[in-house]
Amino acid sequence: MIKVFLIFTFLQLADLGTTLAVFRLGGEERNPLIHYFMALGPVQGVILAKIVALAIGVGCVMAAKYRPLRVANLFFAGLVAWNLSIIARLA
C-alpha cells in the first residue's frame, strides 16, 4: 500500500512543478485555499500547500486509510493534466 503514497507524493511534486511553470508563464492560481496561502508569496504558498497535503497523506498512511489517497491520486492526476493544458495554451 506504500505504492499509493509514493504515487501521491509524485503527483504532489508534479502539481508543484506544473503550477510554478504556469506562474512563470503569467498564469494565476484559482484555488481559494492556495490563494490564501500565497499571502506568504506565490512560491512559498504553493510549497506550504504541498507540505500540508503531504502531512495529510502521511496521516492517512499511519492510520492505514488508503482509500482517501487513491481518490486524491485521481484528483491530482487530473489537476496535473489540467496544468499541462494551461502550460500548452500559455506557451
Image (cartoon, rainbow, N blue to C red):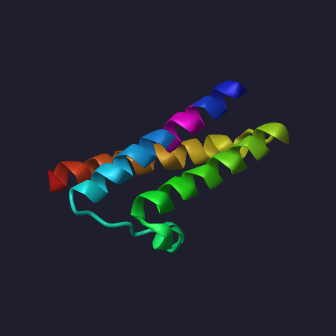
Residue furthest left as drawn: 91
Residue 46 in the image, given as x and y percentages of width and height? 48, 58
Magenta stretch holds residue 11: yes
Q: How many marks?
A: 0
User: In the shown orientation, is residue 4 left or right of residue 33?
Assistant: right
Which residue: 61% across, 50% down? 51
Residue 45 in the image, given as x and y percentages of width and height? 49, 62
Residue 47 in the image, given as x and y percentages of width and height? 51, 53
Residue 52 in the image, given as x and y percentages of width and height? 64, 55
| The N terminus lies in quadrant | top right
Against 91, residue 30 (above or below) is below
User: In the shown orientation, is residue 13 left or right of residue 17?
Assistant: right
Against 3, residue 34 (above or below) is below
Against 78, residue 64 (above or below) is above
Camera-nearest residue between 32 and 51: 51
Magenta region: 7-12
Against 13, residue 36 (above or below) is below
Asked which quadrant contains residue 7, the reply is top right
Camera-nearest residue between 25 and 87: 25
Q: Magenta region, mostly helix, strand or loop?
A: helix
User: In the shown orientation, is residue 66 left or right of residue 80?
Assistant: right
Asked which quadrant contains residue 60, the reply is top right
